[in-house]
């Protein structure tokens, strides 16, 4: 009896603390069957996690400070729902996040909010990433995502700060600006001075992983048929050989949507520039996508076409950097069926044809590494539940 009373008292104390802190537990579990094939002759079947939405668990909270001010926090950890393996994070915006250790890799921020907007510190989504997802009919997920934009970053093989950024300081405009919104971010890789490094190692230079970017747009507060946005980001990356700084990655995008009721149209254009390095002169690539979504029964049908091309580029000796002009096209279709507000079934199909050495992923969490020249096909069948 005494133990029971102690347990009840402990639960009551926790409930009071929980209410005072306004803490919310939330998450997503997304699991499905995925198939992918790439010419010549390779294929893969597997149970996968996070094809539509990354599986995650998190905590967020808010405290009113008075005078119109509030403090808040957001901790969000990704994991593989098919295996239970947690996701680690990247501390310096250079090394890629890995697995086998739970960490708040998706977001770990503390905020101060008021009528002037929000100041946010920590690890957060890159504004450029939001600027892509908001104008892809697949939201940047599944094998059907308009993922040709990723070709620009995969060719350079430095995608760490393209999605999420550590050590960031961000500012978000307040709501109530007539449908206009925006956010800006700066971050540091917190890497050492190059004079202390071995030029033959892959250790990051001072300044590597430093990032600056923004995303601004208009959505009429979600009440109108038209939305538009522009986003920009620049991440510094250096080459250690000969201690020569270069290879900085600069990206910008512009997108728009228009909802006719029976069908919604989506469009996006992206441009990528890789700065000079000891290996090459400046490299440039660009791509675009067009898509549509339409309500169908208890769900939504989505389809898109996307394309991407790199210029051939030149080495520092003036020779072609690529043998041709790496390029590719992607065709996608999918259906998302609502079983309830929190539970969905989905199916998606993506087909890519890449040429002249373009290295691009199909998309989704399973095929997020590149296939070389040839044809690639991916299929997702899954279920997503949020809480």
Image (cartoon, grey):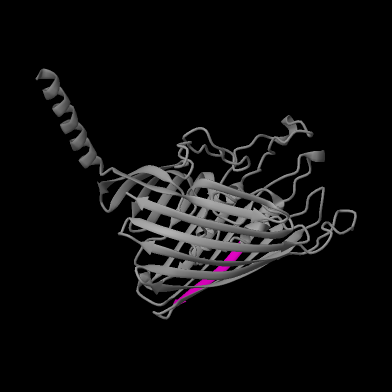
User: Looking at the image, which residue is at 38% across and 47% down?
Assistant: 111
**Percent from the top left, x then y, of residue 51?**
49, 52
Q: Position of residue 131 (x, y in %)?
A: 52, 62
Q: Residue furthest left?
A: 1
Please give left or right for residue 205 compared with residue 267 in the image: right
Instruction: Please name the residue shown 78% across and 50% down the image.
Output: 277
Q: Position of residue 52 (x, y in %)?
A: 47, 55
Instruction: Let me know if residue 18 appears in the view.
Output: yes
In this picture, is 300 found above or below 364?
Answer: below
Relative to the observer, which residue lies in front, 69 or 279?
A: 279
Query: Which residue occupies 58% across, 43% down?
Result: 188
State the image coordinates of residue 288 (x, y, percent, origin top left). 62, 69
Q: Quadrant of residue 261?
A: bottom left
Camera sees residue 145: no
Vertical order, 157 against 86 (above or below): below
Residue 357 in the magenta stretch? The answer is no
Residue visible at 37% across and 43% down in the picture: 58
Q: Quadrant of the N terminus?
A: top left
Tell me which secondary structure the magenta stretch mostly adopts: strand
Magenta span of residues: 252-258
């Amino acid at each position: 009896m005494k133990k029971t009373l102690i347990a009840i008292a402990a639960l009551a104390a926790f409930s009071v603390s929980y209410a005072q802190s306004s803490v919310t537990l939330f998450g997503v579990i997304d699991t499905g069957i995925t198939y992918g094939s790439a010419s010549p002759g390779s294929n893969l079947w597997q149970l996968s996690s996070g094809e539509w939405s990354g599986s995650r668990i998190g905590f967020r909270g808010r405290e009113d400070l008075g005078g119109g001010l509030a403090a808040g926090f957001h901790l969000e950890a990704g994991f593989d729902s098919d295996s239970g393996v947690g996701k680690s994070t990247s501390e310096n915006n250079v090394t890629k996040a890995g697995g086998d250790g739970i960490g708040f890799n998706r977001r770990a921020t503390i905020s101060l909010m008021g009528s002037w907007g929000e100041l946010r510190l920590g690890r957060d989504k890159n504004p450029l990433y939001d600027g892509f997802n908001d104008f892809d009919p697949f939201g940047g997920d599944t094998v059907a995502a308009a993922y040709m934009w990723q070709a620009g970053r995969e060719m350079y093989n430095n995608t760490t700060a393209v999605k999420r950024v550590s050590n960031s300081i961000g500012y978000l405009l307040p709501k109530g600006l007539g449908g206009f919104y925006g956010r800006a971010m700066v971050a540091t890789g917190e890497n050492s001075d190059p004079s202390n490094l071995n030029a033959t190692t892959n250790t990051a230079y001072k300044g590597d992983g430093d990032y600056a970017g923004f995303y601004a747009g208009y959505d009429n507060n979600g009440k109108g048929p038209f939305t538009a946005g522009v986003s920009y980001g620049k991440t510094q990356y250096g080459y250690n050989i000969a201690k020569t700084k270069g290879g900085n990655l600069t990206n910008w995008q512009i997108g728009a949507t228009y909802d006719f009721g029976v069908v919604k149209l989506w469009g996006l254009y992206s441009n990528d520039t890789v700065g000079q390095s000891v290996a090459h002169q400046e490299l440039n690539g660009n791509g675009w996508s067009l898509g549509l979504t339409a309500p169908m029964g208890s769900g939504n049908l989505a389809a898109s076409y996307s394309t991407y091309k790199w210029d051939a580029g030149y080495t520092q000796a003036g020779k072609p950097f690529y043998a041709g002009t790496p390029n590719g096209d992607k065709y996608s279709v999918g259906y998302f069926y609502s079983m309830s507000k929190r539970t969905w079934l989905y199916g998606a199909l993506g087909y890519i044809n890449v040429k002249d050495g373009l290295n691009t992923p199909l998309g989704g969490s399973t095929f997020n590494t590149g296939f070389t020249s040839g044809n690639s096909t991916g299929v997702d069948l899954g279920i997503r539940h949020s809480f």
